[in-house]
Amino acid sequence: MSYFENKIIWITGASFGIGEALAKRLAAENPKLILSSRRSDQLERVRDEILHIYPVDISILPFDLASPDRVNEAPGRAAAIYGHVDILINNGGISQRSMAVETDMQVYRQLMEVNFFSAVALTKGLLPDMIKRKSGHIVTISSVTGKYGSPWRTGYASSKHALHGFFDSLRAELFNDNIRVTLVTPGFVRTNISKNALTASGEKFGKMDEAQASGISPEKCADRIVKEIKTGKEEILIGKKEAFAVYIKRFFPGLFSRIIRKAKVR
């Protein structure tokens, strides 16, 4: 039996990119899926495309990660669908393309609200039931920018660093409750994340980065995530050059500083 078979899996940011690819990849494992994002029409599209291939139970739960009220009520709504949630995949998020000196503080607050506080709130909303059942798995999609910062992404990198601090600490707290915590740190993946990234004023960046366009496909990323979760990995690092940079930063920080300030990141 697959690790995911008959599990109730809730995926945020499931209407596009990595989240959509994860939903489609996981459907092959015969779970029950709950798909969330802001766009109910796109969630319906993803659901219909999956059901055309796999006869799995799928429910959609639209809400906006930027709305604390909607986020706080979402865990209860999700748990009510099938009785509980076995695996939460915190995938929804938003990126940034702007220099710090030009960026409005509201942009930083929005990045933290969507990328960090929503993941914490959704997780905390499910934890009491998971602890009671002594079973559960929290998967959070971070980024290599959660391991090192880069130009044009000060707020995005900050929100992803915060995820590592919270979920690494949470993993230790929940060890005796038999609840797994996995962090996923992808490099460049060929999604619309740069198109939807926030600029200094909070508008959409509106174009795909060259580095993003040359990244791996969402399907390849999703396949790797599913494979590594099955092996019990606590942190999944995806991307060759980007992953190598993590080790350069760790062991040769001075060299890394020279490299990153010259890197073409947009």
Image (tube, rainbow, N blue to C red):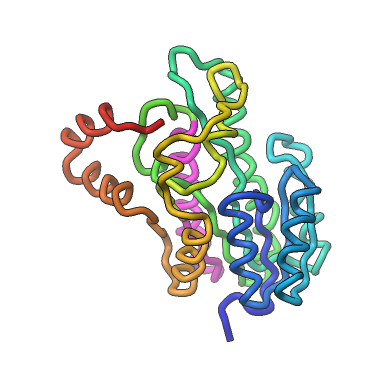
Magenta stretch bounds: 156-183
State the residue at coordinates (63%, 65%): 24
Which one is nearer the viewer's eye here, 218 or 251? 218
Horizontal and vertical percent position of residue 82: 80, 68
Q: What residue lies at 51% left-to-right and 16% top-to-bottom? A: 103
| Residue 81, image quadrant | bottom right
> Where's residue 107, x and y in %?
58, 23
- Compared with residue 266, is residue 126 higher up or lower down, i.e. above or below? below
Q: Is residue 251 left or right of residue 58?
A: left
Q: Is residue 135 above or below residue 202?
A: below
Q: Does the magenta stretch include residue 171?
A: yes
Lateral position of residue 178 relative to residue 256, left or right: right
Q: Measuring 42% from the left and 36% from the top, which residue is drawn there?
A: 210
Magenta: main secondary structure equals helix
Q: Is residue 91 left or right of residue 75?
A: left
| Residue 60 is one of the magenta-drawn residues | no
Left or right side of 100 for 80: right
Q: Residue furthest bottom?
A: 1
Q: Quadrant of the C terminus?
A: top left
Quadrant, the N terminus: bottom right
What residue sits 62% from the left and 22% below the top? 203
Of residues 45 and 231, the one nearer the viewer is: 45
Front-most of 74 and 45?
Answer: 45
Q: Percent from the top left, x then y, of residue 44?
A: 79, 55
Seen from the viewer's position, the closer of residues 61 and 129 is: 61
